[in-house]
Amino acid sequence: MGQYKNQEEAEAAGVYVSKVRSFVKREGRLTNGQAKALESFWPTMGVDFQENLLSFTELFGNDNPVVLEIGFGMGKSLVEMAENDPNTNFIGIEVHRPGVGACLSEAGERGLTNLRVMEYDAVEVFKKMIPDGSLARVQLYFPDPWHKKRHHKRRIVQPEFVQMVREKLAIGGKFHMATDWEQYAEHMAEVMNAAPGYKNTATDGDYVPRPDYRPITKFEVRGQKLGHGVWDLIYQRTN
């Protein structure tokens, strides 16, 4: 906590102090805009963790399909998707508090009403808060590839995880992953092709063209100019 006497003093200064949880999280200082957005928009767009299932109808005030994104970063593409598709509800989960603040700031400026965000471990949210068969799509874009072989076990796309996702998808719902690390794309395809209850929507090989609903990021554009690839994988729940 450094120069701050307690957590309250640190938070008042805009510094996030991580609590004991199942992963290590180091945070930088929130910008004034991010801190203000958290204060202003969390009451209407933020969702606190609870050990009770959510009612999406109550949360959004309608019965529109729900898309959930795990790890939205700074939230730019998630906000763009929500703005471009007002008849779909979006939930974003992110553990990086400055990213949550940035997402809320952008969404608040655009006056979005179909977006909710959470700052918590996505696995716990799925287990405790997401009803079975309730999601139209789950998005996992550019997760940490843990490229060293000894770290592969840390990759989020593992058999147990993808079955947890399948349970929360509606029949016909889709799990959309994207990565700029080819070896991780191959790992994703290997895990998903072996997972029961899914079918690959690709018509040629394991990968699909980037769908129009996923915005291309500045990071992707820079990578493409350097000859880097991006791989999209979309699998549909069959049963």
Image (tube, grey):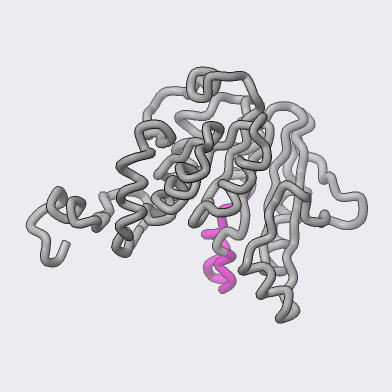
Quadrant containing the N terminus in the rendered view = bottom left
* Residue shown at 36% from the left, 46% from the top: 37
Query: Does residue 226 sit above or below 117 in this rendering?
Result: below
Q: Is 152 part of what is drawn in magenta?
A: yes
Q: Does residue 167 appear in this view? A: no
Q: Does residue 59 appear in this view? A: yes
Q: Is 229 part of what is drawn in magenta?
A: no
**Image quadrant where residue 229 sits:** bottom right
Who is closer to the viewer here, 156 or 106?
106
* Residue shown at 53% from the left, 37% from the top: 112
Query: Does residue 185 sit above or below 85 in this rendering?
Result: below
**Image quadrant where residue 232 sits:** bottom right
Rendering coords of residue 95 (x, y %) = 41, 51
* Residue shown at 75% from the left, 62% from the top: 231
Magenta span of residues: 145-158
Considering every residue shown, the one lying at the far bottom of the view is 226
* Residue shown at 68% from the left, 32% from the top: 136
Q: Is residue 108 left or right of residue 227?
A: left
Rendering coords of residue 227 (x, y %) = 75, 79
Rendering coords of residue 6 (x, y %) = 10, 53
Quadrant containing the C terminus in the rendered view = top right
Considering every residue shown, the one lying at the far left of the view is 5
Q: Is residue 227 left or right of residue 69?
A: right
Q: Is residue 34 left or right of residue 224?
A: left
Who is closer to the viewer here, 99 or 229?
99
Q: How many marks?
A: 0
Rendering coords of residue 119 (x, y %) = 40, 44
